[in-house]
Amino acid sequence: MNQASLNLLLADLVLVIHFTFVLFAVCGFLVIVFGRFAGWPWIYNSVFRMAHLVAIGFVVMQAWLGRLCPLTIWENKLRVLAGQGGYAESFIQHWLQSLLYYDAELWVFGIIYTIFGVLVLAATILDWKRIFPR
Protein backbone atom coordinates (compact mmCIF):
# COMPACT_ATOMS: atom_id res chain seq x y z
CA MET A 1 0.00 0.00 0.00
CA ASN A 2 1.49 3.34 -1.03
CA GLN A 3 1.31 6.54 1.05
CA ALA A 4 -1.56 8.05 -0.98
CA SER A 5 -3.67 4.92 -0.50
CA LEU A 6 -2.90 4.90 3.21
CA ASN A 7 -3.87 8.59 3.51
CA LEU A 8 -7.11 7.90 1.66
CA LEU A 9 -7.87 4.95 3.93
CA LEU A 10 -7.18 7.09 7.01
CA ALA A 11 -9.36 9.91 5.61
CA ASP A 12 -12.22 7.44 5.15
CA LEU A 13 -11.69 6.18 8.71
CA VAL A 14 -11.88 9.75 10.03
CA LEU A 15 -15.06 10.22 7.96
CA VAL A 16 -16.63 7.15 9.61
CA ILE A 17 -15.61 8.36 13.08
CA HIS A 18 -17.02 11.81 12.29
CA PHE A 19 -20.28 10.37 11.01
CA THR A 20 -20.53 8.21 14.15
CA PHE A 21 -19.98 11.28 16.32
CA VAL A 22 -22.77 13.13 14.48
CA LEU A 23 -25.09 10.14 14.88
CA PHE A 24 -24.29 10.01 18.60
CA ALA A 25 -25.02 13.73 19.02
CA VAL A 26 -28.28 13.71 17.04
CA CYS A 27 -29.65 10.25 17.66
CA GLY A 28 -28.51 10.29 21.27
CA PHE A 29 -30.89 13.17 21.93
CA LEU A 30 -33.74 11.45 20.12
CA VAL A 31 -33.12 8.29 22.14
CA ILE A 32 -33.11 10.32 25.38
CA VAL A 33 -36.43 11.98 24.56
CA PHE A 34 -38.04 8.75 23.35
CA GLY A 35 -36.54 6.82 26.25
CA ARG A 36 -38.11 9.15 28.81
CA PHE A 37 -41.55 8.36 27.42
CA ALA A 38 -40.80 4.66 26.90
CA GLY A 39 -39.51 4.29 30.45
CA TRP A 40 -36.02 3.10 29.51
CA PRO A 41 -33.92 3.35 32.68
CA TRP A 42 -30.56 3.19 30.87
CA ILE A 43 -31.06 6.66 29.36
CA TYR A 44 -30.29 8.04 32.83
CA ASN A 45 -26.79 6.55 32.77
CA SER A 46 -24.52 9.39 33.88
CA VAL A 47 -21.61 8.45 31.60
CA PHE A 48 -23.86 8.35 28.54
CA ARG A 49 -25.61 11.61 29.42
CA MET A 50 -22.44 13.54 30.26
CA ALA A 51 -20.66 12.25 27.14
CA HIS A 52 -23.64 13.38 25.08
CA LEU A 53 -23.74 16.81 26.74
CA VAL A 54 -19.99 17.31 26.30
CA ALA A 55 -20.19 16.21 22.65
CA ILE A 56 -22.87 18.73 21.73
CA GLY A 57 -21.22 21.39 23.92
CA PHE A 58 -18.01 20.93 21.92
CA VAL A 59 -19.93 21.36 18.65
CA VAL A 60 -21.66 24.51 19.90
CA MET A 61 -18.38 25.99 21.17
CA GLN A 62 -16.66 25.38 17.83
CA ALA A 63 -19.52 26.96 15.93
CA TRP A 64 -19.48 30.11 18.02
CA LEU A 65 -15.71 30.35 17.70
CA GLY A 66 -16.11 30.06 13.92
CA ARG A 67 -13.92 26.97 13.78
CA LEU A 68 -14.28 23.88 11.67
CA CYS A 69 -14.39 20.57 13.49
CA PRO A 70 -10.91 19.08 14.01
CA LEU A 71 -12.17 15.88 12.36
CA THR A 72 -13.10 17.86 9.23
CA ILE A 73 -9.67 19.49 9.18
CA TRP A 74 -7.92 16.16 9.69
CA GLU A 75 -9.96 14.41 7.01
CA ASN A 76 -9.32 17.27 4.55
CA LYS A 77 -5.56 17.15 5.16
CA LEU A 78 -5.50 13.40 4.61
CA ARG A 79 -7.56 13.71 1.41
CA VAL A 80 -5.27 16.43 0.05
CA LEU A 81 -2.23 14.29 0.91
CA ALA A 82 -3.91 11.43 -0.99
CA GLY A 83 -4.34 13.70 -4.04
CA GLN A 84 -8.05 14.40 -3.57
CA GLY A 85 -9.83 17.67 -2.86
CA GLY A 86 -11.00 18.46 0.66
CA TYR A 87 -14.18 20.16 1.83
CA ALA A 88 -14.44 23.92 1.42
CA GLU A 89 -16.97 24.08 4.27
CA SER A 90 -17.84 22.24 7.47
CA PHE A 91 -18.57 18.50 7.55
CA ILE A 92 -22.30 19.09 8.15
CA GLN A 93 -22.53 21.76 5.45
CA HIS A 94 -20.79 19.51 2.95
CA TRP A 95 -23.00 16.50 3.56
CA LEU A 96 -26.25 18.44 3.90
CA GLN A 97 -25.52 20.16 0.64
CA SER A 98 -24.58 16.84 -0.95
CA LEU A 99 -27.60 14.98 0.44
CA LEU A 100 -30.26 17.67 0.63
CA TYR A 101 -28.99 20.44 -1.63
CA TYR A 102 -29.14 22.76 1.37
CA ASP A 103 -26.56 25.51 1.69
CA ALA A 104 -26.18 28.02 4.49
CA GLU A 105 -23.50 30.14 6.09
CA LEU A 106 -21.53 28.71 9.00
CA TRP A 107 -23.28 31.08 11.43
CA VAL A 108 -26.65 29.53 10.54
CA PHE A 109 -25.33 26.15 11.58
CA GLY A 110 -24.01 27.80 14.75
CA ILE A 111 -27.53 28.89 15.64
CA ILE A 112 -28.92 25.44 14.85
CA TYR A 113 -26.21 23.77 16.96
CA THR A 114 -26.88 26.20 19.80
CA ILE A 115 -30.62 25.50 19.80
CA PHE A 116 -29.90 21.79 19.76
CA GLY A 117 -27.34 22.22 22.55
CA VAL A 118 -29.86 24.12 24.68
CA LEU A 119 -32.36 21.28 24.18
CA VAL A 120 -29.74 18.72 25.24
CA LEU A 121 -28.83 20.83 28.29
CA ALA A 122 -32.50 21.25 29.21
CA ALA A 123 -33.08 17.49 28.96
CA THR A 124 -30.04 16.91 31.17
CA ILE A 125 -31.24 19.41 33.76
CA LEU A 126 -34.74 17.92 33.74
CA ASP A 127 -33.29 14.46 34.39
CA TRP A 128 -30.49 15.57 36.73
CA LYS A 129 -31.80 13.79 39.83
CA ARG A 130 -32.24 10.53 37.93
CA ILE A 131 -28.85 10.82 36.23
CA PHE A 132 -27.08 11.59 39.52
CA PRO A 133 -29.15 10.06 42.31
CA ARG A 134 -27.92 10.68 45.82
Image: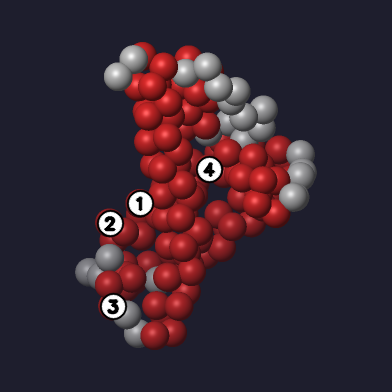
Q: What whole-number distance in Å separates the C-alpha atoms at marks 4 and 3?
A: 27 Å
N-terminal-most mark, 1 or 3: 3
Between marks 1 and 3, how big is the CA–CA gap? 17 Å
Label of residue 47 in the image: 2
Name the spot of residue 124 as percent of width and height, x first. Answer: 43, 64
Helix, strand or loop at disc 4? Answer: helix
What residue did someone put label 4 on?
59
Residue 74 vertical position relative to residue 109 in the rendered view, above or below: above
Query: Label 2 sits on what residue type?
Result: Val
User: Could you say where residue 11 lies in the image, as x and y percent from the top left?
Assistant: 43, 29
Residue shown at 59% from the left, 57% from the top: 116
In the picture provided, is 29 more to the left or to the right than 114? left
Which three-letter amino acid code belongs to the residue tagged 3? Answer: Pro
Residue 126, given in percent of the width and then of the height, sits at 46, 71
**Distance from Cα at disc 4 to Cα at disc 1:** 12 Å
- In this orientation, which residue lies closer to the viewer: 73 or 63? 73
Which residue matches tag 1?
51
Give amino acid for label 4: Val
State the separation of the CA atoms marked 3 and 2: 13 Å
Q: Earlier in the sequence, mark 3 or mark 2?
A: 3
